[in-house]
Amino acid sequence: MLTDLLLGNYRKKVLSQLLLHPDADYHVRELARLTETAPGTLHKELFKLAAAGLLLRKEQGNQVRYQANRQCPVFPELASLLRKTTGAAEVLAQALAPLQPSLALIFGSVARGTETATSDVDVLVITERGFGDVVRGLHGAQTTLSREINPVVYTPAELKAQVAEQAPFVVNLLAGPHIFLNGTLDDLSQLAGHPAPASL
Amino acid sequence: MTLANLLAIQRLQAFEASPQGVQRLLAAAERNLVDAQLQALSRENRFDAAYKCILQCAVLGLWARGYRTPTSQPGHHQTTLQCLPHTLGLATDVVIVLDALRKQRNQNDYEGEPVSPAVVTECIHQAQSLLAHTRQFLQVQFPHLLK
């Protein structure tokens, strides 16, 4: 919603596709199909975005292909904004909503913004529901995102116990960075039983 | 993808299991499920034992239908589990969970990621119900394999 306001729905779709898949380059028609936009308008839009330095424009024979430009000074900020509001986060938050988890967040490479085309999406889900419920809930999202989802499921009590034991995997996971799907940093601190590290 | 198609692309091999072979594998699956409930073991090893039980049940399903997976082939666990709707008639949403357990095993075996209590509970629960289902299936549809 927020990105719709800031960028407009059209630009949000196109930039999400490009900036959240920075390893891929796209032909205009391909991009139009993926984002359900009109190729005519898209042409002009992409040309302007490339001129502004946010996209790379590559000519391959008589085809023009566009790709995100990681060297653009605002690339990390824009990609991060889109990552939090569109793409994986939105899809996963919706998929998990029926389970009403105490907390859910993305960690790992997708949260760090260092994911590659084949990275899994690592998701921590704090809930009293079983692992099977979470897997079934998230299954459809794997197809939508074209990425494997790797859920890590703890009950609130188990999470506390892991923190108390200083279990390396959980300590590392809690250090972040995170993209919150359900709940906030405050909720996480409360669940973990201590203030979360300041490195967030 | 049907079992016959998987045979054609050599993801499966034709195989005639002997009753002794079937009973030995069923006994191994049962033993693994018992071991999975040994509280003295780490979560990771209890999970492993329960996962083995699941895989062995899935192999029994293939054997009963006259197939096996070439174990030298990468991805044979995945193939074996994904055949379950065709071999033991499992519902797809059960196979989705079993396949997620397979991925958890990879995360643990190859990356040392710990197995959470929720995953152990799920794996044992799935192993129990699949083993009961497999026994019932063999008794009803392939009773000669149990004699």
Image (cartoon, helix red, strand yellow):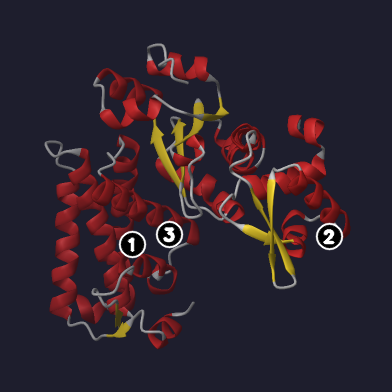
Residues at badges 1 and 3 in contact (C-beta under 8 Å)? Answer: no
Nearer to us: label 1 or label 3: 3
- Give the chain of mark 3: B
- In this rendering, the answer to whether A58 lies above or below B86 is above
- In this rendering, the answer to whether A60 lies above or below B47 is below
User: Would residue B92 appear left or right of B67 to someone viewing this image?
Assistant: right
Which x, y percent locates residue B60? 27, 71
> What's under tag 3, amino acid-wise?
Val
Which x, y percent locates residue A124? 44, 34
Secondary element under disc 2, as helix, strand or loop, is helix
Using the image, tell me which numbered label, if any, was put on residue B125: none
Q: Quadrant of residue A170?
A: top left
- Give the chain of mark 2: A
Residue position marked by numbered label 1 in the rendering: B133
- In this rendering, the answer to whether A122 lies above or below B141 is above
Q: Quadrant of residue A156?
A: top left
Using the image, tell me which numbered label, if any, was put on residue A39: 2
> What's under tag 2, amino acid-wise?
Pro
Residue position marked by numbered label 3 in the rendering: B95
- Which one is in front, A166 or A28? A28
Mark 1: few/some/many CA within 10 Å (<14, 14-19, 20+): some
Residues at badges 3 and 2 in contact (C-beta under 8 Å)? Answer: no
- Which one is in front, A14 or B3? A14
Q: CA distance from mark 3 to mark 2?
A: 40 Å
Residue B16 visible? The answer is yes
User: Would residue A146 appear left or right of A41 to someone viewing this image?
Assistant: left
